[in-house]
Amino acid sequence: MVFLCQECGNTTNEPESHYLHLKQNHPYSPALTKFYDKRLFKFNDSNFPFAE
Ligand SMILES: [Zn+2]
């Protein structure tokens, strides 16, 4: 699965990388909020931290 950044066109096949990209580059992107629903993304690391 490829994750496409709607803000800048960046692509990655790693959900963690995509999440971090959004968080670091587009902290206010509405796309970032989707990541708070972990059911939508099969994170490889189940302990992937969401807390600040
Ligand atoms: Zn981006």
Image (tube, grey):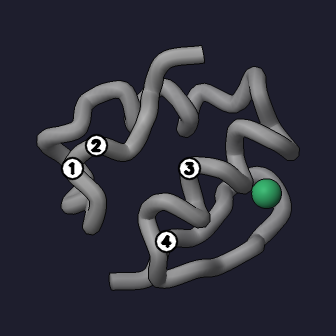
Q: CA distance from mark 3 to mark 4?
A: 9 Å
Disc 3 marks a residue whose amino acid type is Tyr
Q: CA distance from mark 2 to mark 3?
A: 14 Å
- Is 41 above or below relative to 29? below
Between disc 2 and disc 3, the foreground one is: 2
- Asked whether the residues under the numbered discs 4 and 1 touch, taking CB atoms below 8 Å apart as contact, a structural biologist would say no
- Answer whether labels 2 and 3 touch (C-beta < 8 Å): no
Q: Secondary structure at mark 4?
A: strand
Residue that mark 4 sits on: 3
Q: Quadrant of residue 36?
A: top left
Asked if the residue at tag 2 contacts the one at tag 1, i.e. Cβ–Cβ closer than 8 Å, the answer is yes
> Which of disc 3 and disc 1 is earlier in sequence?
3
Q: Which mark is residue 47?
A: 2
Give the x, y percent position of residue 22.
69, 46
Amino acid marked by disc 1: Ser
Q: What percent of the width, then of the height, locates residue 12?
A: 58, 80
In this rendering, the answer to whether 11 lies above or below 38 is below
Task: Identify residue type, mark 2.
Answer: Asn
- Residue nearer the viewer, 20 or 40: 20
In the displayed structure, 33 sits above or below 48; it is above
Residue at 28% x, 43% y is 47
Distance between mark 2 and mark 4 Cα atoms: 20 Å
Q: Position of residue 48 (x, y in %)?
A: 37, 45
Residue occupying image coordinates x 72% and y 55%: 21
Determine whether the beta carbon of the residue marked 4 sits less than 8 angstroms from the nearest atom of ligand 1. no
